[in-house]
């Protein structure tokens, strides 16, 4: 069991890392190469995050206030944060859920189940915000069910849930691993495969392992893994970026956000794992200092650690 100092660093790393990945991924939509993106980061006064981080913050706020995942409280927190800042780049699903709850008094999970013709959403929204769940429940035997509960207020499709649960497992496993020494690629990549419960995510976890083992370069890997906002076409490349560069925050981040696709979310997902593995010391200080609302994000990470004591 990691001691409290290590846990603090890892919880801060997971939360701040994910938020920075989101904010820098959003900058990468300008179509820059690595040098251009580095200079854009240097020139900007503040790194502004998107809906991915607003919802991760909402999850952490709800868990720290209630002590567990509570559908009504989590949904209300997400909805209040959306109403305060609707301009953060939300896709259609979550605002539709909030509106159904307000206009018809539907439950959050009921509204979520009604989306997309009654299938529920398989967008990457449940996975993009999962960092606090993977961190806080890293030692829970029912991590998959906790991830499902965190997804259920907006993402009811089994693939949407599975993507969130697999990323929660990756973050949780990263918390438990010592950052010194070689990264246990075989064990970690097998764990991802074992965690997946839908064929769509399972197939991609098998493919990620193969692409890394065969050293397939990032542009080819991104093309083969997918580049859409569906979770089975974005989470896999974020995991590829982490597995290819588990020892460098910068390399993982640039790989995640510079190969097309849903760049902010790829950055948020890949850097959530990286930060939870290496800890906050791995995050470039100059970038961290520019992160918008960093104090609140750090306070939430520290509260989550304190609740584990
Ligand atoms: N059938 C068809 N298309 C679907 C389905 C489905 N069952 N589920 C999702 N989509 P959404 P999110 C498509 O709206 O997951 C922001 O930019 C559909 O086109 O539930 O929170 C974030 O930063 C739908 O609009 O929202 C992330 O990048 C889209 O997937 C992303 O959006 C997204 O699902 C997260 O979106
Ligand atoms: Mg976003």
Image: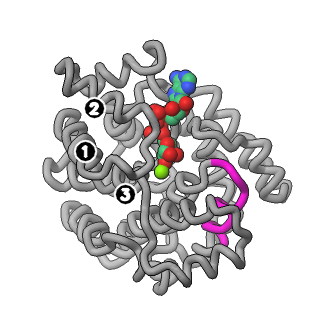
Looking at the image, is mark 1 or mark 2 earlier in the sequence? 1
Callout in the foreground (3, 2) = 2
Tell me the quarter of the picture where residue 217 sits: bottom right
Side of 9 relative to 74 (left or right) = right
**In the rendered image, which residue does mark 1 sit on?**
83
Q: Are marks 1 and 2 in contact (CB under 8 Å)?
A: yes
Magenta region: 251-261
| Separation of marks 1 and 2 at Cα, in angstroms | 9 Å
Please state if 79 lies on the left or on the right of 247 as rendered.
Answer: left
Q: Are marks 3 and 2 in contact (CB under 8 Å)?
A: no
Quarter of the image with the C terminus is bottom left
Does 303 sit above or below residue 111? below
Q: Is residue 161 magenta?
A: no
Residue at (30, 52) in percent of width and height = 85
Q: Earlier in the sequence, mark 3 or mark 2?
A: 2
Q: Can you tell which quarter of the image residue 99 is in? A: top left
Q: Position of residue 188 (x, y in %)?
A: 61, 54
**Residue mark closest to the camera, 1 vs 3:** 1
Q: In the picture provided, is 238 more to the left or to the right than 216? A: left
Q: Residue at x 30, y 71 (%)?
A: 298
Q: Residue 38 is drawn in which quadrant?
A: bottom right
Residue 277: where, in percent of width, then height? 50, 67
Label 1 secondary element = helix
Helix, strand or loop for disc 3 = helix
Residue in the foreground of this view, choosing between 43 and 131: 43
Residue positioned most to the left: 66
**Earlier sequence position, callout 1 versus callout 3:** 1
Other residues around mark 1 within 10 Å, as few (<14) / some (14–19) / many (≥20): few
In three-dimensional space, the C-alpha distance between marks 1 and 3, rounded to whole angstroms, equals 27 Å
Q: Which residue is mark 3?
A: 135
């Amino acid at each position: 069991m990691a001691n409290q100092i290590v846990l603090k660093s890892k919880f801060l790393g997971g939360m701040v890392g994910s938020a920075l990945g989101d904010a820098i991924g959003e900058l990468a939509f300008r179509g820059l190469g690595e040098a251009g993106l580095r200079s854009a980061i240097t020139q900007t006064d503040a790194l502004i995050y998107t809906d991915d981080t607003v919802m991760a913050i909402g999850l952490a706020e709800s868990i720290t206030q209630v002590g567990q995942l509570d559908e009504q409280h989590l949904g209300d927190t997400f909805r209040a944060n959306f109403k305060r800042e609707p301009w953060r780049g939300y896709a259609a699903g979550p605002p539709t859920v909030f509106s159904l709850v307000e206009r018809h008094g539907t439950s959050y999970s009921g509204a979520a189940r009604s989306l997309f013709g009654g299938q529920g959403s398989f967008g990457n929204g449940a996975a993009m915000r999962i960092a606090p769940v993977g961190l806080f429940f890293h030692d829970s035997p029912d991590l998959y069910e906790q991830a499902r509960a965190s997804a259920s207020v907006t993402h009811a499709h089994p693939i949407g849930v599975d993507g969130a649960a697999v990323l929660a497992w990756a973050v949780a496993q990263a918390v438990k691993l010592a950052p010194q020494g070689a990264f246990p690629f075989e064990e970690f990549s097998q764990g991802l495969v074992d965690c997946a419960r839908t064929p769509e995510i399972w197939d991609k976890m098998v493919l990620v392992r193969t692409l890394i083992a065969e050293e397939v370069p990032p542009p080819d890997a991104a093309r083969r893994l997918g580049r859409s906002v569906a979770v089975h076409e974005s989470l896999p490349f974020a995991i590829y970026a982490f597995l290819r560069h588990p020892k460098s925050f910068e390399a993982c981040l640039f790989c995640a956000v510079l190969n097309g696709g849903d760049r902010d979310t790829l950055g948020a997902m890949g850097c959530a794992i990286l930060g939870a593995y290496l800890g906050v010391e791995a995050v470039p200080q100059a970038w961290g200092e520019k992160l918008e609302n960093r104090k609140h994000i750090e306070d939430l990470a520290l509260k989550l650690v304190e609740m584990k004591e």
